Image (cartoon, rainbow, N blue to C red):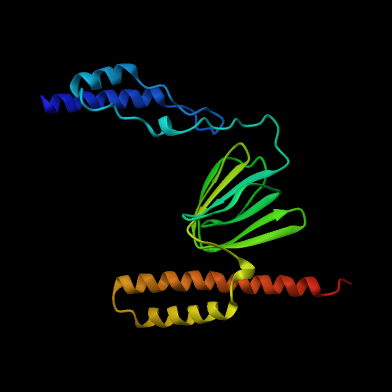
Amino acid sequence: MLRQGSRFLLSRASAASMSWRRQFSTDLPAETVGDSKFNDAWKKLIPNVDPPKTPSAYMSPRPPTPSTIPSKLTVNLVLPYDSVLAAKEVDMVIIPATTGQMGVLPGHVATIAELKPGILSVHEGNDVTKYFLSGGFAFVHANSVADIIAVEATPLDHIDPNLVQKGLADFQQKLNSASTDVEKAEAQIGVDVHSALNAALTEAVFQLVMKQVPQS
């Protein structure tokens, strides 16, 4: 009986998922209508348990994609414990994706990108604000909204170069003396993060020097 019931539920769930399949686009509203036949069958077999819901049942309707490309990109930069940028309208952001630096302008195609340790550049006119991200994900929506989720985000001008150099040396020493795979992995992560920090600070200093050089 239980086997037959489970096979029935699986077949109905598969059929329901096929009926819910739709085009991948952020301008479509969240799905809220369930499969009534599936729900009825579920209640007959398991009356004391509510039918399962799809993730879309918990989502608010997605903002529509504008008919024309907006002049600004809306950016949200969120950490586990803080919201660094909330609905900030900017001209462009450059994201440290694992595939390389990715520039995002208004009207960018919907994209999900994994982030590596590196610099997030936020461009507002002639002003550029830079944050060092330790890693995370970026979700670029078709409605010119970019959600950037990171573990840590620190303004670049708040980072002490001397502490970065010390941290890099310490983790390199730990990597050289590591005896287990776990110790090696932890030390390698520290080396990678501090190397990215050091490279970002070096680039920032170079750009500052270049700005001070008189143009001929």
Residue drawn at 53 percent across, 56 percent down:
99
Residue 108 location, quadrant:
top right
Residue drawn at 24 percent across, 18 percent down:
41
* Residue 189 in the figure: left or right of residue 130: left
Does 152 appear above or below 71? Answer: below
All told, the count of numbered labels is 0
User: Quadrant of the image for the C terminus?
Assistant: bottom right
Does 195 appear above or below 27? Answer: below
Question: Residue 2: image x %, image y %?
Answer: 12, 27
* Residue 46 in the figure: left or right of residue 82: left
Question: Residue 54: image x %, image y %?
Answer: 37, 31
Question: Residue 62: image x %, image y %?
Answer: 54, 32
User: Quadrant of the image for the N terminus?
Assistant: top left
Does 67 appear above or below 75? Answer: above
- 155, 119: nearer the viewer: 155
Residue drawn at 13 percent across, 28 percent down:
3
Residue 155 location, quadrant:
bottom right
- 60, 1: nearer the viewer: 60
Residue 40 location, quadrant:
top left
Residue drawn at 36 percent across, 70 percent down:
185
Residue at the outermost left position? 1
* Residue 150 in the figure: left or right of residue 160: left
Question: Residue 87: image x %, image y %?
Answer: 62, 45
Residue at the outermost right position? 216
